[in-house]
Image: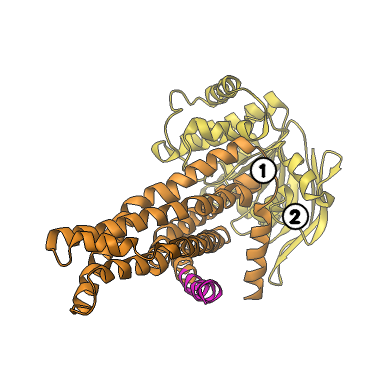
């Protein structure tokens, strides 16, 4: 445990070494933005739209009462999506998609001696392979999460429009209501996302980069990356919520 | 020239290398031979600095590599080209990008100069019109040649080849061996080939180190190896009963 923590800190320390050539690292950063962020947009938009749709149906049926105005559904969806569903659930999904991808990519590079090849050339392999991944995730994940928020609201609106479970105007009114708190909520959501982005990429990189063995271990590293990223996301979620919302 | 003195290395209390010293000569193909598990790869990793030896020193020409700081080690490593057993080409890069990688990373060459150098290196190893293919789209023999092209792209002073013939048919293996020997003479490099292929030993072995069980058992050249009296090496060279019969 302590040995692993030491190796993890060692890895993080080496990320901040001066790049051998900035232009090469910049290209790596852009590639990773596409790989980690842009290529996740389809699954994120699909998940978010369905989450928003299901939430509208569940909330509308749960609070069906003459005493509760219809716009409460929209307000509830906004709170749920902004505070929890988009930053946390989508990050857990990204931990599965991106985390396993990073661990298996780096693990395979380790097994096939590609990392050794970088080291022999005199390249800081941690800085070259891990650094751009972490920076790209810190940059692109908040954008992905804002995109997810939009699709979540859109999915909910689509259900209102197609089923008339509540009027669309009331749904939009609910989303726009009590907007003075929106900035705080979005700041909270994006702060969480940045922390989760760091957790996902650094933990997954750790399991891939320090892999020992062969193809079987690549699979294990991939599983460990997802499991531990998810555990640390949930833990960080609790801590951040207590720090920022209470 | 690469020289190492009294190299020892253990893993979890098991001694893999025991007090090995040797000199790899410039302009020659130097071979490290031995059975699988004899410590050849560990010794090579100690020499290039991928592993730290427990005891012993490594010298690149007159530079004591083992004592260098990380930054200085990197500058020595820029003069090293290495061909790995599995080629170790970067999967996500094309043939051209693989060969161009060290040039783009470490030199200030213009893009035209980089491409010119890449094409020269690829032509030198006889890879034509494959620039835009990915490593998975070319054969094992071609991958080795591309890896050699990448290794020589920076005009290295030292070339390490870890089992360059593994997984290749005998004809392609000889082509790779000859290529390594030609490049060694052409660039006057200190070349170190790790192998257990006797064809390679007899083809290119100008300066040979034989290790067995992590211990240096013999040194010499390809002419001397056939008359060897060391039992472990004799068993290694004349492994087939047919060869033993011919020798007797």
Q: What stretch of residues is rendered in magenta?
A: A230-246
Mark 1 lies on residue: A19
User: Residue A111: x percent and y percent?
Assistant: 52, 55
Q: For mark 1, name the chain.
A: A
In the displayed orientation, state which residue is furthest to the right: B62
For this view, does B39 lie left or right of residue B242? right
Quick check: is A233 in the magenta stretch?
A: yes
Front position in the image: A174 or B202: A174
- Return the residue nearer the eye: A24 or A52: A52
- Percent coordinates x, y for residue B225 in the rendering: 69, 43
Residue for point 64% across, 30% down:
B181
Position of residue B73 relative to residue B115, above or below, is below
Badge 1 crowding class, 10 Å Cα cut-off, few under 14, some 14 to 19, many 20 or more, is some
Picture residue at 62% right of the left edge, 70% below the top: A4
Decide whether the magenta segment is chiefly helix, strand or loop.
Answer: helix
Evaluate whether residue A179 shows in this view.
yes
């Amino acid at each position: 445990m302590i040995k692993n923590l030491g190796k993890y800190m060692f890895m993080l320390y080496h990320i901040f070494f001066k790049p051998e050539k900035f232009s090469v690292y910049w290209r790596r950063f852009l590639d990773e933005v596409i790989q980690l962020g842009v290529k996740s947009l389809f699954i994120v938009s699909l998940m978010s739209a369905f989450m928003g749709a299901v939430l509208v149906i569940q909330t509308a049926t749960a609070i069906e009462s003459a005493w509760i105005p219809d716009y409460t559904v929209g307000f509830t969806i906004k709170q749920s999506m902004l505070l929890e569903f988009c930053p946390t659930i989508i990050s857990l999904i990204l931990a599965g998609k991106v985390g396993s991808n990073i661990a298996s990519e780096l693990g395979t590079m380790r097994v096939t001696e590609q990392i050794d090849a970088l080291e022999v050339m005199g390249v800081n392999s941690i800085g070259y392979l891990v650094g751009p991944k972490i920076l790209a995730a810190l940059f692109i994940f908040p954008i992905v999460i804002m995109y997810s928020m939009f699709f979540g609201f859109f999915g909910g609106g689509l259900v209102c429009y197609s089923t008339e479970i509540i009027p669309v105007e009331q749904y939009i009114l609910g989303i726009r209501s009590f907007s003075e708190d929106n900035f705080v909520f979005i700041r909270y959501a994006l702060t969480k996302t940045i922390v989760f982005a760091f957790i996902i990429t650094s933990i997954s990189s750790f399991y891939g980069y320090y892999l020992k063995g062969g193809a079987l271990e690549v699979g294990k590293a991939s599983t460990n990356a997802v499991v531990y990223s998810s555990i640390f996301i949930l833990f960080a979620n609790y801590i951040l919520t207590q720090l920022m919302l209470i | 020239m690469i020289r190492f003195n009294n190299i020892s290395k253990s893993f979890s209390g098991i001694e893999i290398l025991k007090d090995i010293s040797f000199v790899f000569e410039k302009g020659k193909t130097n071979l490290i031979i031995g059975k699988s598990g004899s410590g050849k790869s560990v010794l090579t990793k100690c020499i290039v600095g991928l592993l730290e030896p427990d005891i012993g020193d490594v010298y690149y020409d007159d530079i004591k590599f083992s004592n260098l700081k990380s930054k200085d080690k990197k500058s020595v490593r820029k003069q090293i080209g290495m061909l790995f057993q599995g080629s170790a080409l970067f999967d996500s890069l094309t043939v051209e990008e693989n060969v161009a990688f060290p040039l783009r990373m470490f030199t200030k060459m213009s893009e035209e100069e980089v491409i010119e150098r890449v094409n020269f290196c690829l032509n030198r190893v006889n890879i034509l019109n494959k620039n835009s293919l990915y490593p998975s789209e070319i054969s094992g023999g071609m991958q080795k040649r591309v890896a050699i092209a990448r290794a020589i792209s920076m005009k290295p002073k030292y070339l390490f080849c870890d089992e360059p013939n593994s997984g290749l048919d005998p004809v392609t293996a000889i082509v790779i061996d000859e290529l390594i020997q030609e490049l060694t003479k052409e660039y006057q490099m200190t070349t170190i080939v790790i192998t257990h292929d006797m064809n390679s030993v007899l083809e290119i072995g100008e300066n040979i180190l034989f290790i067995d069980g992590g211990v240096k058992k013999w040194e010499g050249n390809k002419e001397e190896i056939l008359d060897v009296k060391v039992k472990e090496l004799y068993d290694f060279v004349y492994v087939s009963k047919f060869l033993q019969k011919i020798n007797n």
